[in-house]
Every structure is written in C-alpha cells, then in structure tokens.
Image (cartoon, rainbow, N blue to C red):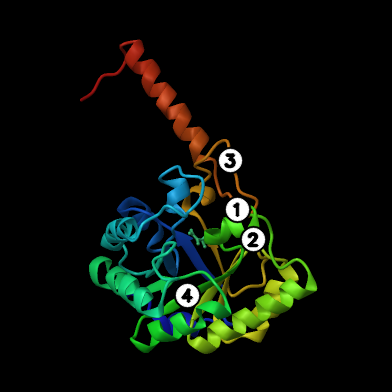
Amino acid sequence: MKPITLPQLTAMKGVTAQVWATAYDAWMAKILDEVVEVILVGDSLGMVVQGKENTLPVTLDEMIYHTQMVQRNCQRAFLVTDLPFLSYQTSPQEAIRSAGRVLKEAGAQAVKLEGGKEMAETIHALTRVGIPVVGHLGMTPQSVHAFGGFGKQAKDSQGAKRLLEDAQDICAAGAFAFVLENIPHDLAQQVTRAVPALTIGIGAGGDTDGQVQVFHDLFGLYEDFTPRHAVKFGELGKEMKQMAQNYALAVREKKLISP
Ligand code: KIV
C-alpha cells in the first residue's frame, strides 16, 4: 500500500471526489485507512470521545496522544490533525510550535485550523516552514460561543461575501484545502469553483471537492443524538447495545461458556 501524498490529493480537484473521515484511535484508523484519502484527528474528540459539550477544552497534548494512536494504523491515508483552541490563535510563532509538535511527536502530515482572513498570516507562517495547512470556514466549532450555537453560517449575502473572501485569503496564504461546515449548499458550490484549494464539505451539500464525516456519526454509534450534518451508514450503536444485553443475559442465566 503506497501512502497518499499531498500532490496526489491536490491533483484530485475537479477530477475525483475526495473522502475524508475522522478517527481517534488505532482501531478506527485500521477501519478507515484503506478506504479514505484523508484521516482527520478532529478536536471533535472532545465531544464524541470525551463526552464534553464542545471542543474548547481539548488540549494539544490530547490531540498528540490521539494522533499517535491513529498514526500507528495509518499506512495509506494522509493524516491531518486539528490544532485545538488556543494552541494557534495567539501568534504565528505559537502556531508553529504547536503544529511542529503535532508533526514531530505524533506523525501527522498536516494541521487543520479554524478561521478566515485573520488566520492568513498564521497559515503563511506555517506553510513557509513546510507545514501543510487545512483551513476551516463556516460553522467553526471553536467559535461556538460567538455564534451562539452550532447553527448554519453565512446565510445572508453579506455572510456569503465574507466567507468567499475568507476562502480566497486563506488559499492565497497557502492552505491546500479547507473544510466548509454547515453553510448553504449553493455558496459551497460557488466557493469550490472560485478557489484552487480543495473544499471539503460537511453539511455543505454535494458540490464540494470532497466530504468529511465524524466517525461516530458515519457508523451511527450514538443512539440518542444525531447532528443535522451527520450522514449515517448504519446503526451500530443500537446493535452494540443489543449485544451488550445479550452478553448480560448469558452471564445471568449462566449460559456464558468461555473456551
Ligand atoms: O473536529 C472535527 O472532527 C472536524 C470535522 C467535523 C471537520 O473539524
């Protein structure tokens, strides 16, 4: 299995839809590695793994720990890791230090960070030292308090204009791809046509250069909560609960005979 390279990813723009998905440990990486082009160690792990209300408490050390696990079974897919809240916003130098640790200590091949034109200088600084960058526009979860929730962004013409400008600015700064989360579908299509970088959608319609989904959403691991942008391909959460009940019953009825 040959590893997918960054030039191969960028050459896919306008040719083949790109498949991205999140993973947070070695087992998840094993499931995805042969199937997707990019594995993202998302700071969504704060919510789906740690059970927190949002991504803000996730630390750089935690991102490194999870990336190390994923990296062990990431032989083919390109590995991207999120920079968590306050590990890059304070200065470009701080961003280089944080991203450098993610590459050096965990083996990620690129970092993802949230924000538009205000992040252009930081993106430029990272790419200048050879760290590939993925941007993230639209509903950026690290700004959940500023947005007042996880709802759709760039809904009016002013918001759409700002998002398009942000996309152009982060591309000019060197981002090779960016996530478009929870924005109107026609805007995602317009942005995709306007920029040279790859656009990776989640809750942004079908006309982006690729799609990203959170592991737990993809497999239906949560029974009681499904985010609006989630696309489920199964209901494993329900099945696993049933299996746990079958196990409990077998123990209680003394029918569990181990080899
Ligand atoms: O943290 C994450 O998993 C993400 C994806 C939803 C794009 O940023």
According to the picture, the residue beneath numbered tag 4 turns out to be: 134
Question: Which residue has dot 1 on it?
Answer: 231
Q: Name the amino acid type tagged 2.
A: Gly
Q: Mark 4 and ligand 1: say if the CB distance to the nearest ligand atom is below 8 Å.
A: no
Circle nearer the viewer, 4 or 2: 4
- Amino acid bearing label 4: Val
Q: Which residue is mark 2?
A: 203
Of circles 3 and 1, which is in front? 3
Q: Residue at x 30, y 11 (%)?
A: 254
Query: Are there few (<14), some (14-19), or many (20+) residues within 10 Å of tag 4?
Result: many
Q: Amino acid at mark 1?
A: Val
Callouts 1 and 2 close, C-beta under 8 Å: no
Q: Earlier in the sequence, mark 3 or mark 2?
A: 2
Q: Is mark 3 within 8 Å of ligand 1?
A: no
3D distance between C-alphas at marks 4 and 2 = 18 Å
Observer-nearest of 170 and 176: 170
The percent position of residue 114, horizontal first and vertical second, equals 51, 69
Q: Quadrant of the C terminus?
A: top left
Disc 1 residue crowd, few under 14, some 14–19, many 20+, Cα 10 Å: some
